[in-house]
């Protein structure tokens, strides 16, 4: 499972908390340009795997390769600068910043982030700031959040915060975006919009996505391939139809039916 | 000359407000904008006060210095020294969560106080450092006070403009983001420990400058001046009451709290002796009560953190296309 077009390779990842093995030898890879779905019952270790891939927690053992480079020991912020960007399952907005500021803080290497640049090269800082603002305004428009641009992010609805999370990934030159349950808590209408946005970003911006999701309709619509995890391990990988009809998957969900048929 | 006494008192109070305003601005950088719980303001205040005292006072037998350097050199030295002390403390403690940082900084401030109190080769121990030059100190009393007030006001104005500009910049936005959600800031590529260290050093340098202005105003500095009650907690109350995250609020809070604090001293001093002693504690109680009332009814302070409003985005520009890739 190794090759030039592999964007992400997760090898034998393990995460133990005390005696509990939250992730227990998880391996999978993500091909460039795909929207890979990551499904599995609650407690399967999906979010823990995400946290390790994003660099939020160091794995107990195992390796993570991104664009052919071993990033296992790289900090989160360094992975971000390589284009590996994540969103959070529970929205992590900057609650006292406005929606616009939430986006404007994202772009890396802004000249105004230096303590001295504001005094030594104010012209460059201003020019940078204009560019960043224009991009943030565009992104808000794309997400249809223009009307709340000046609202504190903490006052937005759950769904709007989810959109803002997605928006942050659009403020940098992301290559691989990890989306952790983008649909959770989002109403149906907004959800369809969100699917549309993800598909557009994949098609037109060339983002590769890994998507944790419980909404099977969304998985079916967007994801190929689909990876199913259970008890910290990958159970099966394949297209949606294959994964969905696999008896092991049905068993893993313990009666929880996979798919909209239920 | 009743009115002259009044003017003198007002000027005296204004000078103290200016000095405390520097401490509050320093704390605002650390707490208001970056979320760092520094409970050791008195320590950085002391480092600044003593550094400038050692650098500018005339030579004295039995302790380091004095080097008799010009006053501005002393003030610069105070900022550098406070920043240098802040660097290792920040390096070690900023990994801790906010409440642990508070405990660690209280401890560090206490260590600094003990060093100041006992290392006579450095600080002349309990006797303190005297003969600290005060700019325009040889003018007549009122003129000298007014001149010093002008200097304090000038320094404060420069510090205020500096901090305000920094906050309005992308640096300030990044700091507020780190304060609001550290994990997300990290996930958005910000080097959180480094940025926190920046804010910690920046704020501590201002506190050191406040200490230096205090020492030169009093012309002497003794360990008693490093009282956590007035040099740490009073500053906290000033910032919370005035509005953390707002520089003008910080300065307003300083003025309000300091006026109440020193006015209440006048009142209690007029009481008969047996009550006056007890009333001292009443002043502390009064300040504490005021903090409670503010936290209960106006937790954001008198002047809350301003909300940045950009030029309104064009609502007609909404569409379903993604923004073009940059550059």
Image (tube, coloured by chain):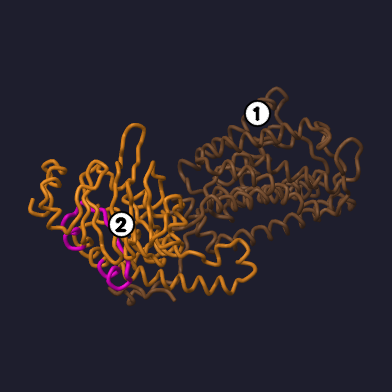
Chain colours: A orange, B brown
Quadrant containing the N terminus of chain A is bottom left
The residue where tag 2 is placed is A179
Q: Nearer the viewer, residue A60 or B286?
A: A60
Residue B201 drawn at (x, y percent): 63, 50
- Front residue of this view, candidates B9 and A44: A44
Residue, far left:
A261
Q: CA distance from mark 1 to mark 2?
A: 61 Å
Quadrant for residue B247, please give it.
Answer: bottom right
- Chain letter of mark 2 equals A
B163 lies above or below B118:
below
Mark 1 belongs to chain: B
Q: Determine whether A153 is above or below A112 in the image.
A: above
Relative placement, left or right, of B169 versus B326 is right
Structural crowding at the residue carrying mark 1, measured as other residues with C-alpha within 10 Å and reported as few (<14), some (14–19) or many (≥20)? some
Q: Nearer the viewer, mark 1 or mark 2?
A: 2
| Residue drawn at 48 percent across, 42 percent down | B295
- Direction top: furthest residue: B274
Residue range in magenta is: A199-222
Residue tagged 1: B279
Q: Position of residue A90 (x, y in %)?
A: 32, 50
Residue positioned most to the front: A2
| Secondary structure beneath label 2 | strand
Label 2, residues with CA under 10 Å away: few <14, some 14-19, many ≥20: many
Q: Does the image show residue A149?
A: yes
Rendering coords of residue A175 (x, y %): 37, 65
């Amino acid at each position: 499972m190794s090759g030039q077009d592999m964007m992400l390779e997760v090898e034998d990842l393990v995460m133990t908390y005390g005696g509990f093995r939250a992730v227990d030898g998880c391996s999978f890879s993500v091909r460039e340009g795909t929207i890979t779905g990551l499904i599995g019952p609650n407690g399967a270790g999906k979010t823990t795997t995400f946290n390790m891939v994003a660099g939020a927690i160091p794995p107990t053992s195992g390796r993570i390769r991104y664009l052919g480079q071993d990033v296992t020991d790289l900090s989160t912020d360094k992975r971000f600068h390589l284009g590996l960007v994540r969103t959070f399952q529970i929205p992590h907005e900057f609650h006292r910043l406005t929606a616009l500021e939430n986006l404007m803080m994202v772009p890396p290497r802004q000249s105004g982030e230096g303590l001295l640049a504001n005094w030594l090269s104010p012209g460059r800082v201003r020019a940078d700031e204009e560019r960043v603002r224009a991009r943030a305004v565009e992104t808000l428009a794309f997400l249809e959040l223009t009307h709340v641009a000046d609202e504190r992010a903490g006052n937005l609805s759950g769904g709007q915060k989810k959109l803002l999370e997605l928006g942050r990934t659009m403020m940098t030159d992301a290559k691989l975006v990890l989306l952790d349950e983008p649909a959770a808590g989002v109403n149906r209408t907004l959800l369809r919009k969100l699917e549309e946005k993800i598909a557009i970003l994949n098609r037109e911006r060339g983002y590769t996505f890994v998507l944790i999701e419980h909404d099977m309709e969304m998985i079916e619509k967007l994801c190929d391939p689909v990876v199913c995890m259970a008890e910290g391990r990958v159970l099966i990988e394949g297209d949606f139809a294959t994964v969905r009809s696999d008896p092991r998957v049905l068993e893993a969900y313990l009666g929880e039916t996979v798919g909209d048929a239920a | 000359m009743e009115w002259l006494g009044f003017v003198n008192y007002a000027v005296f109070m204004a000078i103290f407000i200016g000095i405390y305003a520097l401490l509050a601005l320093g704390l605002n950088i650390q707490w208001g904008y970056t979320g760092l719980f520094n409970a050791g303001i008195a320590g950085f205040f002391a480092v600044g006060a003593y550094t400038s005292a050692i650098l500018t006072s005339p030579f004295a037998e039995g302790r380091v210095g004095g080097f008799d350097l010009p006053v501005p050199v002393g003030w610069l030295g105070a900022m550098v020294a406070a920043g240098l002390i802040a660097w290792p403390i920040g390096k070690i403690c900023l990994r801790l969560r906010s409440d642990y940082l508070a405990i660690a900084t209280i401890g560090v401030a206490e260590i600094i106080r003990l060093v100041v109190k006992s290392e006579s080769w450095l600080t002349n121990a309990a006797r303190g450092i005297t003969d600290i030059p005060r700019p325009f100190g040889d003018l007549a009393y009122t003129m000298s006070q007014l001149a010093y007030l002008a200097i304090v006001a000038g320094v404060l104005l420069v510090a205020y403009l500096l901090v305000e500009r920094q906050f309005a910049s992308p640096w300030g936005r990044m700091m507020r983001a780190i304060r609001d959600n550290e994990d997300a800031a990290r996930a958005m590529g910000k080097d959180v420990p480094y940025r926190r260290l920046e804010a910690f050093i920046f704020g501590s340098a201002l506190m050191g400058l406040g200490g230096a202005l205090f020492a030169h105003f009093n012309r002497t500095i003794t360990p008693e001046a490093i009282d956590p009650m007035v040099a740490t907690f009073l500053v906290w109350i000033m910032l919370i009451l005035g509005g953390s995250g707002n520089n003008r609020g910080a300065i307003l809070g300083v003025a309000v709290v300091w006026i109440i604090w020193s006015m209440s001293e006048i009142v209690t001093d007029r009481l008969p002796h047996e009550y006056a002693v007890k009333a001292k504690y009443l002043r502390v109680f009064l300040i504490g009560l005021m903090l409670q009332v503010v936290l209960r009814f106006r937790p954001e302070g008198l002047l809350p953190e301003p909300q940045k409003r950009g030029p309104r985005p064009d609502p007609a520009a909404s569409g379903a296309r993604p923004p073009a890739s940059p550059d």
